[in-house]
Image: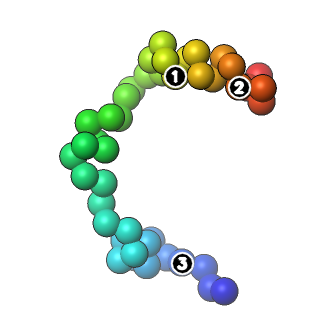
Amino acid sequence: MTALTLEDLDRIYKPPGQLVLDKVLDHVDRHGRAFIGLSPSAW
C-alpha cells in the first residue's frame, strides 16, 4: 500500500455540498456539549 497525496484525495473525494457546509459551527453548541459530557472518554 502506498501513501496517498493530497492530489489523490482530491480526485477520490468530491468537495462537501452546501448542506454539509451549512452545518459547520465555530463553537460547541449545547447539544454537542451534552454529547461530549456523556462520553466516558472525555476528560
Q: Is residue 14 left or right of residue 8?
A: left
The 10 Å Cα crowd at callout 2, few under 14, some 14 to 19, many 20 or more, is: few
Q: Secondary structure at mark 3?
A: loop
Q: Are marks 3 and 2 in contact (CB under 8 Å)?
A: no
- Label 3 sits on residue: 4
Count neighbours of disc 1 (C-alpha within 10 A) and say few if under 14, some if 14 to 19, many if 20 or more: few
Tag count: 3
Measure the C-alpha gap from mark 3 to mark 2: 32 Å
Is disc 1 placed on a helix, strand or loop? helix
Residue toward you, 3 or 32? 32
Point out the image quarter for the C terminus.
top right
Badge nearest the viewer, 3 or 2: 2
Q: Secondary structure at mark 2?
A: loop
Tell me residue 21's x, y (percent).
Answer: 28, 42
What residue is drawn where x is 31% and y is 44%?
A: 20
Mark linked to residue 32: 1
Q: Amino acid at mark 2?
A: Ser
> Quarter holding the N terminus?
bottom right
Q: Earlier in the sequence, mark 1 or mark 3?
A: 3
Image position of 28 with respect to 7: above or below: above
Question: In percent of the image, x 25 and y 43: which residue is there?
Answer: 19
Instruction: From the image, tell me which residue sits under label 2.
Output: 39
